[in-house]
Image (cartoon, grey):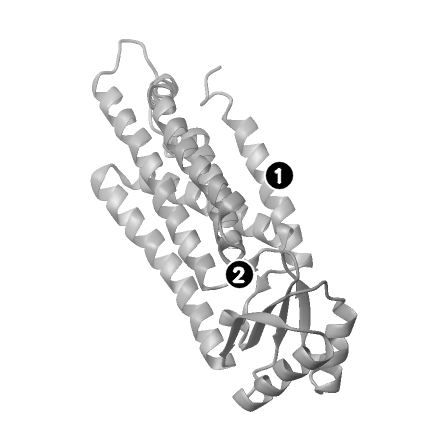
């Protein structure tokens, strides 16, 4: 099968996944942490099973039930997100939890003001945009402008797939989420550049009667083993971290896992076919 000639099937598959993710994003949105929304996050690991209704009852007695969200974690972990609480109010709430529900180990108790949360969200978006612009400039200098456009289009695909699945799975979006996105972008562009480099090399060794789609397909196949092996190595490490790593990093690792798989897919099956289509739309003789 010629990957370039079969590119429409890969385009449709990507579009299907992105549409599902965007629908989830439109209906559910993202599960923002207090890093972006502002407020107080309290995470407790109780020594016995806990009924969420009892937790909400304590919050109601404290007068903050209307502004609070309660979430169950792994085991007997309870996560409470509420409006920004003073240190005194937070201490009173923790004391009430121990008196009315039982003893626990405090895992997290952090507060972020709404202004700081908004600033973090804006800076996160700006960092991703700057990364894209710099990559276009770098790839344009090393290859050509259409290669840069194709690479960024593949990266946008990776971001949309990752964000959509994060929304669908309800994973927490915090400061580590931005670190994960930038890691995914860097990992994916590395694979894409390897393929583009082989395309440029093979174009210099163009065989008589060989067209661009054949050159791109041959380049992809020559780098396929390297791309798959590299991705599998990372996937195995991430899978091990999901199984034996701590609960607090699980969302971060899952986001990386989604992005690495999406990045490998786009580098092999989307970036170079997109470059071919951009060349065709420009009217090049290919």
Q: Classify residue 179 by image quadrant.
A: bottom left
Considering only vertical position in the picture, is 188 above or below 82?
above
**135 with respect to 96 (left or right):** left
**252 with respect to 187 (left or right):** right
Within-10-Å neighbours for mark 1: few <14, some 14–19, many 20+: few
Whole-percent x, y for residue 149 in the image: 36, 43
Residue at 53% x, 30% y is 10
Q: Quick one: 187 or 122, which is closer to the camera?
A: 187
Whole-percent x, y for residue 234 in the image: 41, 37
Q: Quick one: 81 or 51, which is closer to the camera?
A: 51
CA gap between label 2 and label 1 equals 23 Å
Furthest-bottom residue in view?
A: 88
Whole-percent x, y for residue 7 in the image: 50, 26
Instruction: Give the residue pinned by disc 2.
Output: 173
Within-10-Å neighbours for mark 2: few <14, some 14–19, many 20+: many
**19 with respect to 112 (left or right):** right
Point out the tag, 2 or 1, that comes first from the N-terminus: 1
Please identify, in this view, whether the residue under mark 2 or under mark 1 is nearer the observer. Answer: 2
- Residue 149 visible within the image: no
Residue at 75% x, 82% y is 60
- Residue 161 visible within the image: yes
């Amino acid at each position: 099968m010629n990957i370039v000639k079969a590119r429409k099937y890969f385009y449709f598959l990507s579009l299907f996944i992105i549409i599902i993710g965007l629908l989830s994003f439109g209906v559910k949105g993202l599960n923002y942490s207090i890093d972006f929304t502002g407020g107080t996050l309290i995470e407790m690991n109780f020594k016995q099973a806990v009924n969420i209704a009892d937790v909400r009852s304590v919050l109601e007695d404290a007068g903050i039930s209307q502004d609070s969200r309660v979430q169950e974690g792994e085991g007997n972990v309870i996560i409470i997100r509420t409006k920004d609480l003073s240190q005194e109010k937070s201490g009173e709430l923790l004391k009430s939890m121990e008196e009315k529900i039982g003893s626990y180990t405090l895992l997290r108790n952090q507060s972020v003001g709404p202004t700081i949360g908004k600033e973090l969200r804006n800076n996160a978006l700006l960092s991703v945009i700057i990364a894209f612009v710099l990559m276009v400039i770098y790839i344009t200098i090393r290859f050509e402008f259409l290669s840069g456009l194709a690479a960024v289009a593949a990266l946008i695909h990776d971001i949309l797939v990752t964000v959509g699945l994060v929304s669908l799975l309800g994973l927490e979006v915090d400061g580590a989420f931005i670190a994960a996105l930038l890691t995914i972008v860097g990992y994916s562009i590395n694979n894409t550049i390897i393929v583009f480099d082989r395309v440029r090399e093979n174009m210099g060794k163009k065989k008589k009667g060989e067209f661009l789609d054949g050159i791109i397909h041959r380049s992809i196949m020559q780098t396929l083993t390297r791309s798959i092996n590299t991705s599998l190595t990372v996937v195995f490490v991430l899978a091990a971290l999901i199984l034996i790593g701590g609960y607090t990093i699980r969302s971060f690792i899952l986001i990386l896992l989604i992005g690495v798989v999406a990045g490998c897919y786009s580098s092999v099956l989307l970036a170079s076919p997109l470059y071919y289509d951009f060349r065709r739309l420009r009217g090049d003789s290919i």
